Image: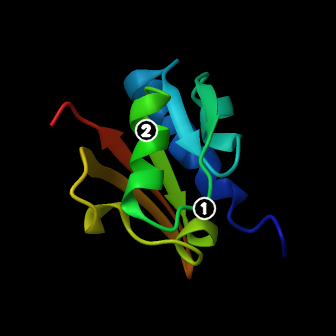
Amino acid sequence: PPDRGRGLHKQAGLYLLGLDSGKRIASRLPFVPFYSRGKWIVAPVASNCSQLLDVVTKKEANYLIMDDGMLSKTFKPEDCPAPLVAMKEFRNNGDFVIIYKATDG
């Protein structure tokens, strides 16, 4: 079904709601920002590290959300020399949502 991964987005959003609500969140879909009461920043499919980092740094995102739909079209943030740290993963079979925290370094 098309919405099989939406539950993972909700779990991730509720996790951020309890941890750090109201932050700026770059993601492909608006669900994590919605459930965490954050501000949605559209994360485009990036073909290189600088495109991905532009979204995080220029838009001052606190978090980047990667899901299976996005990673199938791009690369992993940990492949970039970037100020992004993987914080938490939510998985269900082949579906996943990963929360990356933007750092100062």
Say which label, 2 or 1, has the lower sequence index: 1
- In terms of secondary structure, where does tag 2 sit? helix
Three-letter residue code for mark 2: Val
Q: Is residue 13 left or right of residue 50?
A: right
Instruction: Please tell me which residue is depicted at 39% across the width and 34% down the height of the picture.
Output: 57
Q: Position of residue 14 (x, y in %)?
A: 55, 36
Q: Is residue 66 left or right of residue 20?
A: right
Q: Quadrant of the N terminus?
A: bottom right
Mark 2 nearby-residue class (10 Å; few <14, some 14–19, many ≥20): many
Residue 61 visible somewhere in the drawing: no
Q: Is residue 75 left or right of residue 83?
A: right
Viewer-side residue, 39 vs 5: 39
Q: Position of residue 33 (x, y in %)?
A: 61, 33
Instruction: Please tell me which residue is depicted at 57% across the width and 28% down the height of the picture.
Output: 36
Viewer-side residue, 104 vs 14: 104
Three-letter residue code for mark 1: Val
Q: Quadrant of the C terminus?
A: top left
Instruction: Please tell me which residue is depicted at 68% across the width and 31% down the height of the picture.
Output: 34
Q: Position of residue 6 (x, y in %)?
A: 71, 57
- In terms of secondary structure, where does tag 1 sit? loop
> Spatial distance from mark 2 to mark 1, Cα to Cα?
13 Å
Picture layout, residue 13 above or below residue 72: above
Task: Check disc 2 and report the residue beneath it.
Answer: 56
Picture layout, residue 61 above or below residue 7: above
Checking the image for residue 45, the label placed there is 1
Instruction: Please tell me which residue is depicted at 64% across the width and 31% down the height of the picture.
Output: 40
Q: Residue furthest right?
A: 1
